[in-house]
Image: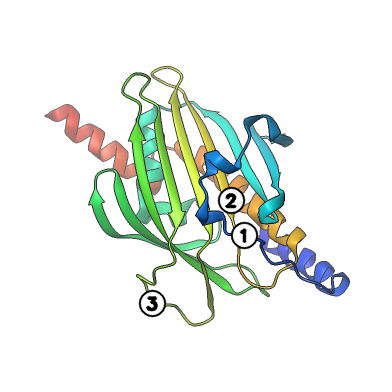
Amino acid sequence: MKIIRLFTIIYSIFFLSTSSFSLFAAEISSISLDTILSESAWKLTKKSRGISHYKQPIKEYDVNAYKGVLVIDRPLETIHSLVTNVENHPLWVTFCSSSSTIRKNSEDDAIQYYRFDVPWPFLNRDIVVHCTQKTDPVTGTVTIDSQALKTPMVPLKKNHLRITDAKHKWIFERIDQRRTKVTFISMTNMEGQTPRALKNLISQVIPSSSLENLKAISMKRDHPATSTYIAKTVVNKKR
């Protein structure tokens, strides 16, 4: 509720004080994150609840990239399962009202669909993403890359804006058997005629609050979002 009130107040301020809107000069989806971003250019914006939040202005794209880094006292497999359990994302991803896998090409390649119910006065958003995963055979580090698709694999919904320009990356690094370093990087064009500063605020707040939620539920073994991994673990041990 605090996030909803925040967006309503801020939107009113920007709507009254901003007479021009900024459109993106280029498409995020056309270039990889590794090409766009510089590791030395990240600026720490805050540390909260064990999470370091960063931003990186991307002049060519008129948007700030977001990075969140945290350590969770849970095994890599547990955190990985929470993030890859797509159907449970509404339990912890901020504003996500539904999510599903619409096509699974392989264990490491899938097409997913998300819908976001955002506060008034914004229109709701949805997005179709192509997700790929790779695991470093030496370190065991898992990287998940996702990119928004322009192809209308899911029919456009009434009163929704389709996000077609976005890239995200998850990195899971094993510290030891009980702790995992999690890094999330995001660049998203929220679409619509929203002031640039407000778009940048939204692109920071949504992933940062989602990471806080992820950390919180990962510590609760009885939370619905963790039940899938725990059930699989029990079955595997019995085998």
| Residue furthest out toward the bottom | 158
- Upstream in the sequence, badge 3 or badge 2? 3
Residue behind mark 3? 155
- Upstream in the sequence, badge 3 or badge 1? 1
Residue mark closest to the camera, 3 vs 1: 1
Q: Residues within 10 Å of mark 1 (few under 14, many from 20)?
A: few
On screen, residue 202 versus residue 102, left or right, reads right
Residue behind mark 1? 26
Quarter placement of the N terminus:
bottom right
Residue behind mark 2? 187
For the point 72% across and 63% down, which residue is it?
Answer: 7
Gap in Å between the C-alphas at discs 2 and 1?
13 Å
Amino acid type at circle 3 is: Pro
Residue 120: percent from the left, percent from the top?
66, 73
On screen, residue 160 versus residue 103, left or right, reads right
Residue 136 appears in view: yes
Residue mark closest to the camera, 2 vs 1: 1
Amino acid type at circle 2 is: Met
Choose top left, top right, bottom left or bottom right for residue 230.
top left
Residue 165: percent from the left, percent from the top?
53, 60
Given contact means CB atoms under 8 Å apart, are the residues at marks 2 and 1 in contact? no
Given contact means CB atoms under 8 Å apart, are the residues at marks 3 and 2 in contact? no
Determine whether the residue tagged by mark 3 lies in a helix, strand or loop.
loop
